[in-house]
Image (tube, helix red, strand yellow):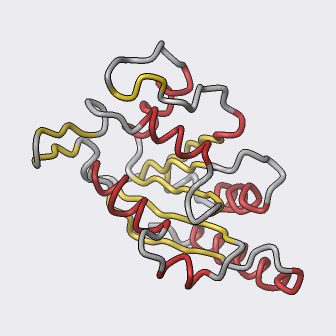
């Protein structure tokens, strides 16, 4: 049975290293074995600001509806994004605020949460100017934030996370190529 894979590029700049990693992954997935769809947040025009909190609905937004439909469709979601100021870019945070909403992704009442996206898995590929180990060890690490507090809260299980640290260091060109190879191998070997 084919897996349905949604690959998300959450870097706003199409010529970024993260965007190159995203394209490498998408181009190496076996479309004979898997159904693949993509979202490129930098090419969307949705309003990333949750204007009323969750007290009332915002106007219908085609990019948000498309995103929710694709998240519902997917068995596995792969995120590509940079870590800025020890967290995700504002564009990704705004997308999460607008897409991963009560009623769609979860419902909570008191201490009880109903997770509507159970059964899905996710993988994270992140880049950082800081060392990767630092990003994993800080108290509310970017991995923990996505794994436990966002995706896990909705029932999506993060099965793998990779951080490529010190990405802008001039001495890291060989390491950047190795990380591209790692992303390529991850796509080729996806089951």
188 left or right, relative to 73 = right
Relative to 130, does residue 155 appear above or below in the rendering? above
Which quarter of the figure is the C terminus placed in?
A: bottom left
User: Where does residue 179 sit, x and y in percent of width and height?
Assistant: 70, 77
Q: Is residue 61 above or below residue 76?
A: above
Residue 133: % across, % down? 56, 85
Instruction: Please determine whether, in this image, residue 80 is positioned above or below residue 176.
Output: above
Residue sitting at 34 percent across and 18 percent down? 56
Q: Nearer the viewer, residue 168 or 25?
A: 168
- Identified at 44% across, 72% down, the residue is 160
Relative vertical location of residue 130 with respect to residue 149 in this rendering, above or below: below
Residue 1 screen position, x and y as percent: 36, 53
Horizontally, residue 86 falls left or right of residue 77, namely: right
Q: Residue at x 55, y 60 (%)?
A: 87
42 or 7: which is nearer to us?
42
At which x and y percent is residue 149? 34, 57
């Amino acid at each position: 049975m084919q897996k349905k894979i949604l690959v998300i590029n959450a870097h706003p700049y199409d010529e970024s290293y993260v965007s190159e990693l995203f394209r490498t992954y998408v181009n190496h997935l076996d479309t004979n074995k898997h159904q693949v769809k993509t979202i490129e947040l930098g090419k969307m025009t949705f309003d990333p600001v949750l204007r009323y909190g969750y007290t009332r609905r915002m106007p219908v937004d085609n990019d948000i509806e498309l995103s929710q439909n694709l998240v519902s469709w997917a068995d596995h979601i792969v995120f590509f994004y940079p870590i800025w100021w020890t967290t995700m870019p504002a564009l990704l945070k705004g997308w999460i605020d607008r897409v991963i909403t009560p009623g769609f992704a979860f419902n909570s009442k008191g201490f009880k949460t109903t997770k509507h996206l159970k059964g899905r898995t996710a993988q994270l590929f992140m880049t950082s100017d800081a060392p990767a180990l630092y990003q994993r060890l800080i108290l509310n690490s970017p991995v923990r934030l996505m794994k436990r507090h966002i995706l896990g809260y909705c029932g999506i299980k993060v099965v793998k996370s990779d951080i490529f640290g010190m990405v802008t260091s001039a001495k890291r060109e060989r390491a950047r190529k190795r990380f591209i190879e790692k992303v390529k191998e991850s796509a080729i070997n996806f089951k």
